[in-house]
Image (spheres, rainbow, N blue to C red):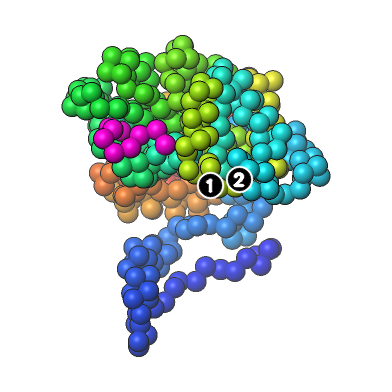
Amino acid sequence: RPSGTPRRTLPTRLSDAPGGSFLDRRIDALSVDDRAIVARGDYFYEPVIEATEGSRILIEGRWLLNFASYSYLGLIRHDYVDQAAERAVREHGTGAHGVRLLAGTLHLHRELELTIARFLGTEDAVIYTSGYMSNVATVAALVGPGDHVIGDVHNHASILDGYRLSGATVTSYAHNDLADLERALRKAGSAGKLVITDAVFSMDGDVADIPAISELCRRYDAALMVDEAHSIGVLGATGRGVVEHFGLDRASVPIRMGTLSKTIPSTGGYVAGSADLVFALKNNARGWMFSAAGTPPQVAAAKAAFEVIETAPELVSTLRARTDRYRSALRALGFDTMGSTTPVVPIRCRDTAQAHEMARLSQRGGVFTQPITYPTVPKTLPRLRTIVTLSHTDAELDQAVAVLADAGRAVGLI
Ligand code: PMP
């Protein structure tokens, strides 16, 4: 083990010891399921990556092809991005001076916000320190008790946490089901209404019907917020997400949330929209007001990555072509890719055990994938999730297809 990373050891049951406390019992209760997964040891759990070379990652002394990365355009370790981060450290150091409203706003923060706005064609944007925080803080700022928040049942956990914090009445509609959405809108009557959906659903790789959702929002006077975590750099001819993909006008999605942790190789998140929206969020979103600004290298790297995509939009079409070829190969083998039309390509499995076995076999064959099972997805829809990025060469994509084919035959899936 080159870096001497300590091996994960199975935690002992704390409350087996005499005189166990409430905390011991609570910790045991919280970790019972995960302890069983680690004990089985049949696939990597919180794997520690010791090195990265192209699409290959070193885990426990073995190089594996990374088919679980969100770095869709392969911009992690891009020279231009890395240099921008290095320059920011030299000029500003590694920390911000606190929260944005006080001494935390460097020119880098505003430059990134205006770069995002330019990229998306909005008036302004506000950056948060994570995508998770962007959703939680924005939802909680925009709606409250007495309002209704209405979202796709597959929405990301950070959106659900925003619902809770907001205190608004929550309705989840069936996945991409417009009739169900309309029922919820009608039921909410004249209350304030916020509709939220992921653009690309991160576990299925399918795309929300934004034109129809937007039209319903217009008809029922509901605000529409779209989470573009998995659509920036992926959807639209030049990677600008759902508005470009569907050829919509800007007003059709007034609240455009995204992350800086997937296609954009940094951490952070943002909401882009009108200058008035951004001003209102900066004075009401508590996760922005009361949490420190992003660090100089992180913010500079994000801005540089948007510039890379602006100057090399062909990256987006290349990713699409490679993904389509890979997905078609899997489908030709008989795998069910669950309606994916994006680089998130799940392989539907019969049950949880089969998804785990697929992951174990694919990792044994040198392809790093993760099983996605209940409670992340419904009990009936366990899957192996694979993700294509621009770091994969054509030969590596072929290699992955061959490994997955062997795994699928071994477990009787194809
Ligand atoms: N929204 C979606 C749809 C996501 O998939 C994620 C991350 N997996 C987030 C929000 C949170 O973003 P971050 O990881 O940047 O906090």
Residue 383 in view of the camera: no
Task: Give the residue at x 64% y 56%.
Answer: 50
Query: Residue 9, percent across and down?
Result: 49, 71
Residue 129 or residue 193, whichever sits in front: 193
Query: Residue 200, percent across and down?
Result: 42, 29
Residue to which mark 2 is pinned: 99
Residue 248 in view of the camera: yes
Q: Which residue reaches farthest right? A: 90
Neighbours of disc 1 within 10 Å: few (<14), some (14-19), many (20+):
few
Quick one: quadrant of the N terminus?
Answer: bottom right
Task: Give the residue at x 42% y 36%.
Answer: 141
Does 340 appear in magenta?
A: no
For marks 2 and 1, the one nearer the N-term is 2
Task: Give the residue at x 31% y 50%.
Answer: 375
Residue to which mark 1 is pinned: 290
Q: Gap in Å between the C-alphas at discs 2 and 1?
A: 6 Å
Query: Residue 39, percent across and down?
Result: 40, 68
Neighbours of disc 2 within 10 Å: few (<14), some (14-19), many (20+):
some
